[in-house]
Image: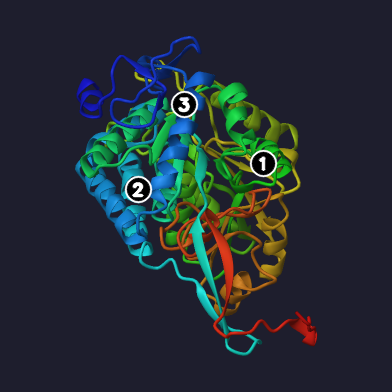
Amino acid sequence: MKEILNSLGIKENNFGAGVGAGAWSSTTDAGMLNSVNPANGEVIANVYQCSESDYDNVIAESQKAFEEWRMVPAPIRGQLVREMGEELRRKKDMLGSLVALEMGKIKAEGDGEVQEMIDIADFSVGLSRQLYGLTMHSERFKHRMYEQYHPLGIVGVISAFNFPVAVWAWNAFLAAVCGDITVWKPSSKAPLCGIAIQNICNEVLQREGYKGIFSLIIGRGSTIGERLINDTRVPLISATGSTRMGKRIGGVVGERLGKTILELGGNNAIIVTPDANIKNTVIGAVFGAVGTCGQRCTSTRRLIVHEEVYDKVKDAVVKAYGQLRIGNPLDENNHVGPLIDKDAVKNYQLALEKVVEEGGKVLVEGGVLESEGYESGCYVKPAIAEAENHFEIVQHETFAPVLYMMKYKGDVSDALALQNGVRQGLSSAIMTNNLREAERFLSVEGSDCGIANVNIGTSGAEIGGAFGGEKETGGGRESGSDAWKVYMRRQTNTINYTTELPLAQGIKFDL
């Protein structure tokens, strides 16, 4: 553990606000935050939380940085992001290990998350030369029109514990090439990942001669979080978390007519048709349900299976669960690590109790592991229950490895009614070799989710596509495609290159 922490510049006691090398906060009056390893319940290191005066300093420095950064040509801004990507390549092993250590996802997933950061850096470098506008024909004689995009300002990023580094990069690297400044409030459940990233930022920025492009504020949501979402100096807030949190942030930022990117809850389903490849279905469903111990916003929550193949799929999935290895996430032989904390364990237990109360049948027993190696109390057994889509517990997202299986009859439209019959709309998938079923799933009358996959599970997202969902998932888009546009302000320009000024509708002034 010491090797991981030392390599990333993490000390026993760390300060929770920073705007560059040698520019960390020094206040201690906002209290100390303990980072706890969910694998063993031990404190990894501590963080002095950001105070309100620290916050004001970070925003003031960010404003100064923006005035200079917006003037740097976009391709040169891309070069800085390229250097960030190279530094992440060098630190991938240690940073991936820290993610596993602090958050609890297995080492392979921790490394995969850092790889996402590297990939979005590469994407952003290319994007820095593709911030395209449009040229339009004017209706006015000897006029021309065009559209361009300008940097927006300070982007506030609020991230969740389950992806403690990648989500920051999705936002920060795009924002950087767009000419914006990022102020990041990471989850208080994974503060050391934020410290590590800020240290990497400081190293690269200092080497390249910049300061304040990426800043960090680790503090209470009730004080620092509220300051951030209410701050008119921050025109865009990108927030990842629960639907409840998103509604609060959306309301506050909307009240001041600011912009938001909201990445909220998912309640994702895989539809399994009679024509599905069962082997691939099992692989996609199991990884989707138990990966990151069920703590992905894209985790598979519901398996909607046609009655013709239901028993076959059920037996195969139950058998696969029997092969899962649960344990220390840094042990590369394990498939599943712990939940983030004991509150998450309680929610997991309540979900299993609730589904039985509502009439569900448990297929794979859950429970909290308590033997040697599981002393933290955060290790749980992935569970499967037969359920009905209308059950209250099924309608809500439980951030834990609980998979609900249900049957459908008839054609794919009946399955789609079940899939779409929840308030969330993030990720979805269909397993089928039937072209008509696949195309219907992808059509306007098909999946109502922001992500719709064919013959691949719900979990995970590729950098090239815009990531996000509909309905109570929030509607925001990050990462690929044209998601960059929300980080900029759009401007339409009309140029008159005549010696006269013709007015609309033939209006004339005798001057």
Check the picture and name the quadrant holding the N terminus.
Answer: top left
Are the residues tagged 1 and 3 within 8 Å (C-beta)?
A: no
Are the residues tagged 2 and 1 within 8 Å (C-beta)?
A: no
- Residue count near mark 3 (Cα–Cα under 10 Å), binned few <14, some 14–19, many ≥20: some
Residue at 55% across / 22% down in the picture?
220
Where residue 320 appears, x then y in whole percent?
A: 43, 46
Q: Nearer the viewer, mark 2 or mark 1?
A: 1
Find the distance from the CA under tag 3 to the CA under tag 2: 28 Å
Q: Secondary structure at mark 3?
A: helix
Where residue 307 appears, x then y in whole percent?
A: 65, 61
Q: Does residue 381 appear in this view?
A: no
Residue beneath label 2, please? 117
- Residue count near mark 2 (Cα–Cα under 10 Å), binned few <14, some 14–19, many ≥20: many
- Residue count near mark 1 (Cα–Cα under 10 Å), binned few <14, some 14–19, many ≥20: many
Residue beneath label 1, please? 253
Amino acid on which disc 3 is placed:
Asn
Question: Residue 492 shows which numbered tag?
Answer: none
Check the picture and name the quadrant holding the C terminus.
Answer: bottom right
Amino acid on which disc 2 is placed:
Met
The earlier-in-sequence mark between 2 and 1 is 2
Q: Secondary structure at mark 1?
A: helix
